[in-house]
Image (tube, coloured by chain):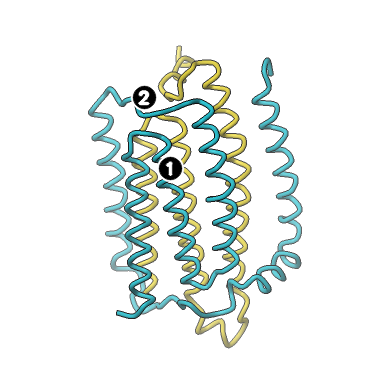
């Protein structure tokens, strides 16, 4: 096994294990910390695929900004394992688990035969994900969506302020 | 790496997110599972952008950058979504003093 394969399997196991712990852990704070671990593992996958810009943006935006916002809200509400709402109906829990598991099973079974198994992903090489190429794409072909997203952010900001205002 | 490893990894992450949305009752954790599903889709887009490199290398080497620009826009939309969604959860907590989504079925009757 080469170093890239070892890194791939390590990051995959880390992402899946931390993802399971997000759902399984009782305290919301631990859930958030495990989700941050998942995002770092996915950033590691981006680095393996040589998508450097997205790896950095993923760390800054997701693990840095969004998850800190989540942690802030959880600490503001003082949530812990005792205040966690429990699923009273055990059947709903089983049914949710079984239906999610069947979704995984069905998609894997459907894709197992159709996916071209010879198609290789270019690892640790290639210029697609470099900042230079993405920047040129973003400011030539995608400049209009880029500007529209600023309007989206402005409306999201105003919406968040209006919603969280008292007696809104 | 073969591309189907990435497909199965992304499908597994997505299913974990779906199971979390279905079985948890804490609104914040449901929201985090939605983020997990978005990230699974992002990972798949990035893997697909590196798939046809041998063909694209001859014709247009930077054509696959489109997929990664899409991932960038997904992150933009997710950031906007989180700010509004957390504001809604805070408001819900202020009104009901709980983050249990089953309190929200009051509109039912």
Q: Is residue A120 left or right of residue B66?
A: left
Q: Position of residue A75 (x, y in %)?
A: 50, 31
Image quadrant occupied by the C terminus of chain A: top right
Q: Pointer 1: what residue?
A: B33
Q: Nearer the viewer, mark 1 or mark 2?
A: 2
Give the label on residue A55, or none: none
Mark 1 on the same chain as mark 2: no
Palette colour of chain B: yellow
Q: Pointer 2: what residue?
A: A85
Q: Position of residue B34 (x, y in %)?
A: 46, 43
Vertical placement of residue B50 versus B27, above or below: below
Q: Chain of mark 2?
A: A
Shown in cyan, the chain is A
Image quadrant occupied by the N terminus of chain A: bottom left
Q: Residue at the spot x=59%, y=58% of the render?
A: A57
Quadrant position of residue B21: top left
Quadrant position of residue A121: bottom left
Q: Chain of mark 1?
A: B
Residue lying farthest to the bottom in this orientation:
B58
Q: Residues within 10 Å of mark 2 (few under 14, many from 20)?
A: some
Q: Residue at the spot x=70%, y=44% of the render?
A: A152
């Amino acid at each position: 096994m080469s170093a890239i394969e070892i890194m791939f399997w390590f990051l995959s196991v880390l992402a899946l294990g931390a993802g399971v712990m997000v759902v399984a852990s009782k305290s919301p704070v631990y859930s958030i910390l495990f989700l941050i671990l998942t995002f770092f593992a996915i950033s590691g996958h981006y680095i393996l695929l040589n998508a450097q810009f997205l790896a950095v943006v993923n760390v800054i935006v997701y693990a840095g900004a969004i998850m800190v916002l989540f942690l802030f809200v959880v600490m503001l509400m003082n949530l812990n394992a005792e205040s966690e709402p429990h699923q009273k109906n055990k059947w709903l829990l089983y049914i949710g688990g079984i239906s999610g598991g069947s979704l995984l099973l069905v998609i894997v079974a459907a894709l197992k035969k159709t996916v071209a198994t010879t198609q290789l992903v270019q690892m640790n090489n290639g210029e697609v994900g470099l900042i230079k190429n993405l920047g040129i794409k973003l400011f030539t072909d995608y400049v209009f969506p880029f500007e529209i997203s600023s309007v989206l952010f402005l409306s999201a900001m105003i919406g968040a302020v209006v919603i969280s205002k008292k007696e809104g | 790496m073969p591309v189907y490893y990435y497909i199965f990894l992304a499908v597994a992450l997505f299913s974990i997110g779906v199971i979390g949305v279905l079985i948890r009752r804490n609104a914040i954790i449901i929201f985090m599972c939605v983020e997990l599903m978005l990230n699974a889709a992002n990972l798949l887009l990035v893997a697909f952008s590196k798939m046809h490199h041998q063909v694209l290398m001859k014709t247009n080497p930077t054509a696959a950058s489109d997929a990664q620009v899409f991932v960038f826009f997904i992150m933009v939309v997710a950031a906007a979504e989180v700010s509004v969604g957390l504001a809604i959860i805070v408001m819900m907590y202020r009104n009901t003093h709980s983050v249990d989504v089953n309190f929200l079925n009051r509109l039912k009757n």
